[in-house]
Amino acid sequence: MIEQALAGKTALITGSARRIGAAIASALHAKGATVIIHYHRSKAEADALAQTLNAERRDSAFLVRADLIEADLSPMMQQVLAHNKGLDILVNNASLFYPTYLQWDAVSAHTLMQVNAFAPYQLSLLARSALEKSQGVIINLVDTHADNPLRDYGLYSQSKAALRQQTLSLAKELAPHIRVNAVAPGAILWPEAKATLQETQKKAVLEGIPLQRLGTPEDIADAVLYLATSSYVTGVILPVDGGRMLKK
Ligand SMILES: NC(=O)c1ccc[n+]([C@@H]2O[C@H](COP(=O)([O-])OP(=O)(O)OC[C@H]3O[C@@H](n4cnc5c(N)ncnc54)[C@H](OP(=O)(O)O)[C@@H]3O)[C@@H](O)[C@H]2O)c1
């Protein structure tokens, strides 16, 4: 049923040069979609992914580069819409993740809220008329920490809570033409850079997961595929977390 479900559809996936975003782009592409791979810094990875996907199907993957900190994302959306003259699926996946502790830091507050919550809102509104035309879908990547805040990551948790609420709000306001849902990953890939964990911290995370292991980027891509292809699901936040949200 799902095999060719996305043939003729176009999907924009933000932050999809690598990690979970790349798995989502590859999964949508495998179901027939043309994908627009958005990236900011990971040009080499974005080029390589587009080349692989275009080798499988000619002119089926395009690139768009943008820093989502920008106040005006309309030039980015114009580029996106110019590729295939329309849009069916918007996946707001790009995100920043780092600790801010209990200190006020105006730059981090602005940066985390802008990239994780306001950029998805702006992109959703900019894509609105194209998505209305296609009876399309928006899928946001939130986090189980949108509900259960992560210690030391207060601003990140707040930004994902905003994105969670935005998903529900847009589902109400963009119906009946556009469905809006979210996937809430648990622990899938270990964080990088400023958020890197020690081995003891990784062990503690794994012990808190009933399924006792990390999820995979493909687990998240499967959930995105489901939300992209269903027709009667909107306003849903779908946890994919190995049971991490269950209370002990
Ligand atoms: N990894 C997990 O276990 C996990 C757990 C819970 C939730 N999630 C959520 O799932 C999604 C994917 O997770 P992930 O770990 O794969 O994400 P990630 O590697 O932390 O980030 C994905 C991409 O976001 C892009 N990005 C960051 N800042 C940007 C900016 N200013 N402008 C444009 N793009 C920017 C980066 O693109 P470039 O590399 O091109 O700069 C990056 O590759 C995220 O929304 C994340 O919050 C992940």
Image: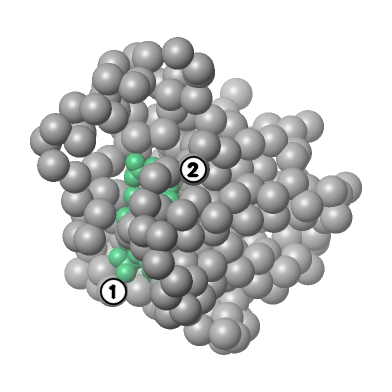
Residue 65 numbered tag: none
Q: Residue furthest front?
A: 102
Q: How is the image coloured?
A: one colour
Image coordinates of residue 204 in percent, x first then y, are: 24, 27
- Which of the 4 image quarters holds residue 197? top left
In the image, taking residue 86 as reference, residue 175 lies left or right, namely right
- Name the one closer to the observer, 118 or 219: 118
Q: Is mark 1 within 8 Å of ligand 1?
A: yes
Measuring 85% from the left and 55% from the top, which residue is drawn there?
Answer: 173
Q: Mark 1: few, some, or many residues within 10 Å (few <14, many ≥20)?
A: few
Q: Which residue is mark 1?
A: 41
- Which of the 4 image quarters holds residue 200? top left
Kind of residue indicated by mark 2: Pro
Q: Is residue 77 above or below residue 206?
A: below
Marker count (numbered) = 2
Kind of residue indicated by mark 1: Arg
Q: Which residue is mark 2?
A: 149
